[in-house]
Image (tube, rainbow, N blue to C red):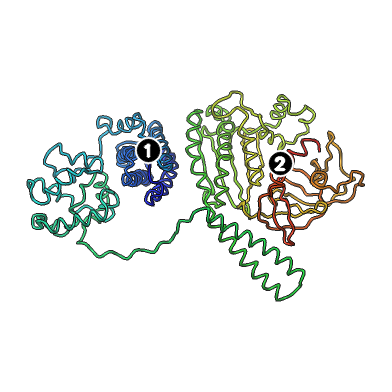
Amino acid sequence: MALDTDDEILQDFLVEADELLEGLNEQLVELESAPQDSDLLNSIFRGFHTIKGGAGFLSLDAMVALCHKGEDVFNILRQGERVVDAEMMDTFLKVLDALNAMFAEVKSGEYPTPADPEILQSLAAYLDPHAAPKAEPESEPVKAPEPEPVTPTTDVNASDDITDDEFEALLDQLHGSASPGATEVVAAPIPVPTPTTTASDSDDITDDEFEALLDELQGKKKADVIKTPELASAPVESTPPPLSKVQAEEHKEAPGKQEIPAKHAPTAKQAETSVRVDTSRLDEIMNMVGELVLVRNRISTLETALENEEMAKAVNNLTVVTADLQTAVMKTRMQPIKKVFGRFPRVVRDLARSLKKEIHLELRGEETDLDKNLVEALADPLVHLVRNAVDHGIEMPDVREKANKPRTGLVVLGAAQEGDHILLTISDDGAGMDADVLRKKAVEKGMMDEESASRLTPPECYALIFAPGFSMKQEISDISGRGVGMDVVKTSISKLNGVIDIKSDVGKGTVLSIKVPLTLAIMPTLMVMLGNQIFAFPLVSVNEIFHLDLSKTNMVDGQETITVRNRALPLFYLRRWLADTFIETEEPKMEHVVIVQVGTQRVGFVVDQLLGQEEVVIKPLGAMLQGTKGLAGATITGDGRIALILDFPELMNTYARRGY
């Protein structure tokens, strides 16, 4: 039987459970380093309890059973009767993995598969009274009035559920047909419930059922029901199912809320402060704002030609409003990068245990916002880089001690906004990279000869790790060592119009920096002319621009180069690749050269004319140009012409490496 995925209640549960599961992933790893943190224990306990409540309302029994066991264990932990250790944390993380698998099944419209019995048995072992006493004293006041040691209500309390037969029996007790001792079972917990727990926490009865039950109780034998002052003052609260141990313990922690007056008039509902909007609608709005930006650019160009003062004022107002609207719409698409960072404490913790290393992960700038599409696209590249830092960067504890380092290695994952770009850094205090070793490895793999390798600068040597098939790992494992992963990272970052930079010191560690734009929808570019065609350079890739006398270039290994700050950079003529106006017999002269960052390499491109900077909206290529190598898309310039946006990594792979 499949779930109704269009059900609004199910969709609300999926949103809430997704957030809770993400939070639990980070909180559980944090708990291992702070096992006595009561706030953290209570927060995790509430997470399991909330998921259980929502799952119970939707009859997702497998999730209810697993969450209930986890909830019971954390109830013991927060009472201080046990302390979390590494083995217990392994069990909790297996529980979380099982919940995530169940959540994925529910999201796809299927009822969740029951958890592995071994996981439930592991949790049950922590509840064994011979291993550690349960939290009976705090639950004692609620259970004490029960007249018999074994009654059906004990099982009901334990599972926070009640059958129809047991509920009818409870009504009989309320109506006076049971013994006085049985009536006391109902009367004892009456002062305890609060409005937040009678219906919302147990999720066992709907509002309509509750009102019908009130009518029945108030119309039948009212004198029999009201036998005590407590019942007389609160007849409404006598009808819900008996409290579970968890609920009773929660109420005991808040004694100030135990006494409840008679039924009050409903309070005014607070106004909603947020609205859930489908992301496709946000994409449509962003696309329309992009079109507005193009219109603004067009009007600005016309205003410059007309030189009318009133027109200039109107255009300036339009520019301000358009910029504000663009910023506002972009913010609606923004998400904190914490959505990506939240998975890494678990990744690092699991890797460190499997490699028998001691590693501490530090997260910085988690609240930095960027486009939701970038958040999703950065997840996989960052996982590769963090795993690489843990496996390759951080040394074994005994090796670190011999090098006078702390046994525990440090990996720092940071994010910060710099203008219209985001800077991501992955640093470690490990062994670092040796440029000479990388040169030798490149020669061994046949990537270059010894003479070419000897001329590589240290940054160029570090960039070799992004070459396909290049790996420094001596042994292949399920973590790394196959020479795949880092080249995928470079490709993924390049597709996001990002650049990568590496700095490393032998024995001190490595810092890898990634710079990506805030959004992929609207891009700042440098407009240039090649012959009669306009091309757009993504501004994030542009390092500098200058005029150069091309008679002062040099030839190195058959490649024309220029020297910039004592460093030789390869020089290419884009007209030779992209325009039909290049004449091989032209004499060298002063030309415009744009230095571009392509991955970890800097390259010079000769262009005919510089037109200036302009914000553009990326449009897909038409059918005739679809799939053309080296082109990322197209846009419309301020004067109405079409400009092609260059994809430099693809451009270099297509032309430079083929000797064009």
Looking at the image, is 570 positioned above or below residue 607? above
Q: Which residue is label 2 attached to?
A: 650
246 over 637 or under it: above or below: above
Query: Circle 2 sits in a helix, a strand or a loop, which is it?
Result: helix
Pointer 1 residue = 112
Residue 396, quarter of the rendered image: top right
Estimate the spatial distance between the alpha carbons at disc 1 and disc 2, rounded to whole Å.
Answer: 44 Å
Q: Is residue 195 found left or right of 459 in the rendered image?
A: left
Question: Mark 1, residues whose alpha carbon is within 10 Å: few (<14), some, or many (≥20)?
Answer: many
Hey, which quadrant is residue 265 in on the image?
A: bottom left
Mark 1 or 2, closer to the camera = 1
The percent coordinates of residue 250 (x first, y second) are 27, 48
Label 2 is placed on what type of residue? Glu
Instruction: Find residue 543 and report its horizontal and vertical position in percent.
Output: 73, 49
Say left or right for 352 vs 190: right
Secondary structure at badge 1 equals loop
Look at the picture and state if 56 lies above or below 263: above
Q: Can you name the residue that lies furthest to the front here?
A: 623
